[in-house]
Amino acid sequence: MYSLKEKSVIQLNINGEIRDVVLSPSDILMETLRGQLGLTGVKPGCENGDCGACTVLVDGWPVKSCLMLTVEAIGKQITTVEGLKNAPIQKAFIEKFGFQCGYCTSGFLMACHALATIHPDPPDILIDDWLQSNICRCTSYEEIGNAIRAVLSGEIS
């Protein structure tokens, strides 16, 4: 258990690297990642958990970082899109045209990467369910679905 004062210096494991951050108890993880660590792949969208643009992985599971306090990330492994480092899902999004403007793309990449890792052989209904956690206004979900299915089938590795 941590006791935080007005401002505290803590360490976070971000993309496999221990990073020092200064925070107040009410700081949101999305703001810390973007503002202090320059990880701008974490996008502010709705800022209430609906759109998924700010999705990161926390111990391998997709989490909307606009809903998580930074202090809750202590002792956890946080992965942002910058930490994927040429994961198959990134190549699949390019080859299957899974983006247009790109604003939502990092959140979808994180959700899809987690899905492929946690459920390597999911039924279509589970894929569709996971894709509902994020919103895209520019493209159809068909291309995004094609990208994750290409990774899951081994077409893109």
Image (cartoon, grey):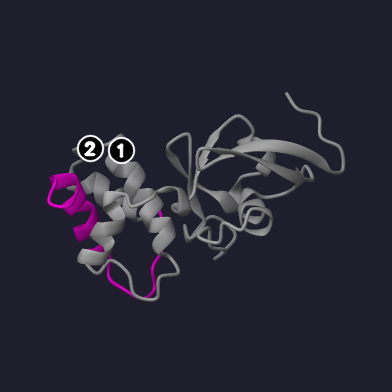
Task: Report x, y in % for residue 18.
Answer: 61, 37
Q: In which quadrant is the N terminus drawn? A: top right
Task: Report x, y in % for residue 39.
Answer: 56, 56
Tally the marks: 2
Residue at 77% x, 45% y: name it: 22
Crowding at mark 1 (Cα within 10 Å: few <14, some 14-19, many 20+): few
Residue at 13% x, 46% y: name it: 153
Between 145 and 110, the residue placed more toward the observer is: 110
Q: Is 106 above or below relative to 4?
A: below
SS label for mark 1 = helix
* Labels 1 and 2 touching (C-beta < 8 A): yes
SS label for mark 2 = loop
Q: What residue is disc 1 on?
A: 117
Q: CA distance from mark 1 to mark 2?
A: 6 Å
Tag of residue 120: 2
Name the side, left or right, on which 1 lies relative to 5.
left
The amino acid at mark 2 is Pro
Task: Report x, y in % for residue 141.
Answer: 27, 65
Tag of residue 94: none
What segment is highlighted magenta in the picture?
133-157
On whether residue 94 falls in the magenta region, the answer is no
